[in-house]
Image (spheres, rainbow, N blue to C red):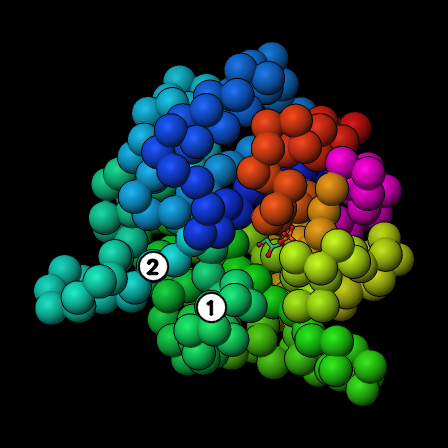
Amino acid sequence: MTRRKFIAGNWKMNMTSAGARTLAGGVRERLANFDRADVALCPPFPYLALVGEVIKGSSIAVGAQNVYPESQGAFTGEVNAEMLADVGCRYVIVGHSERRTILGEKDELLNRKVRHSLAHGLHVIFCVGETLEQREANQTESMLDNQLTWGLREIPADQIPNLVIAYEPVWAIGTGRNATAEQAQQAHVFIRWRFSQLYGSEAAQRLVIQYGGSVKPENAAELMRQPDVDGALVGGASLKVDSFVAIVQAAGG
Ligand code: 13P
C-alpha cells in the first residue's frame, strides 16, 4: 500500500511573532503548487493562531507541541485539545523525548493526552524512541514496545486513523547525527509490526510513521526512500524556509 508522506516542522521553543510570520509565509509561498506530501507546522502556543492565519487557504496544517488532557478549569498554565482545535490546530505532538525527560512526562499521562486529543478530533503525532544507552544495550525494540504499549492503550478503533507515530531516537535529536536509513527502516518495521499486534494489520499498513532526528536536506531523500519511512518530524531544519522546503520536496519524490 502506498502511504502519503507527511512532513511536520517542530519549531520547539523558537521564533518571535515576526519570525513565525516570515517562516510560515515563506513555506506557504514556496509550496504553493506542491501537493505530493502532507505538511504541518508546529509553532509554540503563542503563535498558533498567527501561523494559522498565514497558511489559511493553503494545504498546510498547523499543529501544537503539547496539550493537557482535561476539560476547562483550574489547570494554571495548561491548554486543552478543545482550545487547540478552536484556534485551528489539526495536529498535536505528544510524547516528545524532550517532554519525557525535561518535563518528566510518563506513559500514563501521555496515554491520557493521546486519548483526550483524539477524542476531541485532533490528529496525534505520538513520539517514541530509545536513548543511545538503550540502543547499545540492545534494548531498542523493548523500549519501543513499552512506549507503544503504554502510550497507545485503549484507543477507540474509529480514532486509530488519526494517529501518526514519530520514531525519534534520542541520540539523533539535535545532535547532527541522524539514524542511518537502514536503522530507521528497521525501527519502523518493528513499530509497524507491534502496531499490527495492537490494532490489526490493516490499521498498521495505513499507519504513517515519521522519522525524526537531525533530518536535513542532505539526508532526507535517502531516509524517505525506505519503504516504511513515511515522512519526517523536523526540528532544527524546520526553522529555515530553504531547508524545510527542501525536505518536503525530497519527501515528494
Ligand atoms: P532535530 O531535527 O533538530 O534533530 O530535532 C528532531 C526533533 O526532535 C523533532 O521533533
Q: Secondary structure at mark 1?
A: helix
- Which residue matches tag 1? 99
Q: Which mark is residue 141?
A: none
Amino acid tagged 2: Val
Residue at the farthest left position: 73
Q: Is residue 9 something that shows in the picture?
A: yes
Q: Residue at x 29, y 35 (%)?
A: 49
**Residue sitting nearer the eye, 174 or 141:** 174
Amino acid tagged 1: Arg
Q: Quadrant of residue 34?
A: top right
Residue at the farthest right position: 182
**Residue sitting nearer the eye, 105 or 119:** 105
Q: Residue at x 37, y 66 (%)?
A: 113
Q: Secondary structure at mark 2?
A: loop
The x and y percentages for residue 48 are 34, 39
Q: How many marks?
A: 2
Q: Name the front one of labels 2 and 1.
A: 1
Q: Quadrant of residue 220?
A: top right
In the image, taking residue 86 as reference, residue 28 lies left or right, namely: right
Q: Is residue 162 something that shows in the picture?
A: no
Q: Which residues are magenta?
A: 217-229
Q: Earlier in the sequence, mark 2 or mark 1?
A: 2
- Which residue matches tag 2? 67
Q: Quadrant of residue 155?
A: bottom left
Q: Main secondary structure of the magenta part?
A: helix
The x and y percentages for residue 245 are 65, 28
Q: Is mark 2 within 8 Å of ligand 1?
A: no
Q: Residue at x 76, y 36 (%)?
A: 217
